[in-house]
Image (tube, rainbow, N blue to C red):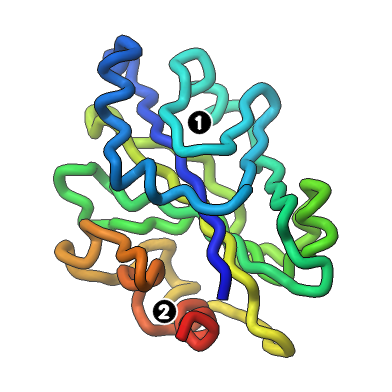
């Protein structure tokens, strides 16, 4: 299975103004390596096509004004379908991620040809929830992952996944997303079970 991913880092509290050098330091090498493929997340005045810290002038717009972004994947296979997952691994804070990988958005059955144009044309299993880090919790990473979907299978959420947007995992698992298994932090239920079949 091919995985495409990108992330942006966001803080919306007024006291979170930073200099460029401070922002560069906050984008760790682990964060920078997270981005793979040609995935583009397109908001009205901001294109996220690499791992980045969102400029201050766009932070409130993402959190309060803008709706779901366009998702473009120029390298998508026209014949395949894809699953998109947007999560916050730092919920409620990076220091205490007890609700790590909070699900902000989940789309399935996105057609490859539509993704090439930036039109996901997908089934929404979890409606888009704007990134709104709680006041005083600092910077949060928002990760977008796009997976090739298993052929001929209908993906759905398990009852546990559907009851909450929080993935029920331990704090040790929440601290890292293994490159060998990008779904390692997620519980083996519903969506993860289907996607893992394609990773192995």
Residue at 38% in and 41% down: 32
Residue at 56% in and 58% down: 4
Residue sitting nearer the eye, 148 or 90:
148
The percent coordinates of residue 46 (x first, y second) are 62, 26
Residue at 24% in and 61% down: 174
Q: Earlier in the sequence, mark 2 or mark 1?
A: 1
Q: Check the image and report above or below for 149 versus 151.
A: above
Q: Dot 1: what SS?
A: helix
Q: Check the image and report above or below for 15 versus 72.
A: above
Residue neighbourhood size for the residue with mark 2, other residues' Cα within 10 Å, grouped as few (<14), some (14–19), many (≥20): few
Q: Quadrant of residue 106?
A: bottom right
Q: Quadrant of the N terminus?
A: bottom right
The percent coordinates of residue 147 (x first, y second) are 58, 68
Marker count (numbered):
2
Residue neighbourhood size for the residue with mark 1, other residues' Cα within 10 Å, grouped as few (<14), some (14–19), many (≥20): some
CB under 8 Å between callouts 2 and 1?
A: no
Q: Which residue is mark 2?
A: 160
72 left or right of 89? Answer: right
Q: Check the image and report above or below for 17 versus 27.
A: above
Q: In whole angstroms, how far apart are the C-alphas of marks 2 and 1? A: 27 Å
96 left or right of 65? Answer: left
Q: Which mark is residue 45?
A: none
Q: Quadrant of residue 164?
A: bottom left
Q: Dot 2: what SS?
A: helix
The percent coordinates of residue 14 (x first, y second) are 33, 14
Q: Check the image and report above or below for 44 versus 180.
A: above
Residue at 62% in and 41% down: 41
The percent coordinates of residue 100 (x first, y second) are 29, 57
Q: Which residue is mark 1?
A: 63
């Amino acid at each position: 299975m091919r995985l495409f991913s990108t992330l942006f880092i966001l803080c919306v509290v007024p006291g979170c103004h930073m200099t460029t050098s401070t922002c560069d330091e906050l984008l760790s090498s682990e964060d920078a390596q997270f981005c793979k493929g040609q995935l583009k997340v397109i908001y009205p005045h901001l294109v996220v096509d690499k791992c980045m810290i969102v400029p201050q002038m766009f932070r409130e717009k993402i959190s309060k004004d803008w709706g779901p972004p366009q998702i473009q994947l120029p390298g998508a296979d026209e014949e395949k379908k894809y699953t998109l997952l947007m999560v916050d691994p730092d919920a409620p804070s990076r220091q205490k991620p007890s609700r790590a990988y909070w699900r902000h958005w989940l789309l399935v059955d996105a057609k490859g040809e539509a993704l090439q144009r930036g039109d996901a044309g997908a089934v929404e299993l979890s409606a888009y929830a704007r990134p709104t880090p709680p006041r005083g919790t600092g910077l949060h990473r928002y990760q977008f992952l796009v997976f090739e979907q298993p052929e001929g299978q209908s993906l759905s959420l398990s009852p546990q996944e559907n009851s909450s947007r929080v993935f029920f995992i331990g704090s040790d698992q929440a601290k890292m997303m293994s490159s060998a298994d990008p779904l390692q932090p997620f519980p083996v239920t519903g969506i993860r079970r289907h996607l893992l079949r394609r990773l192995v």
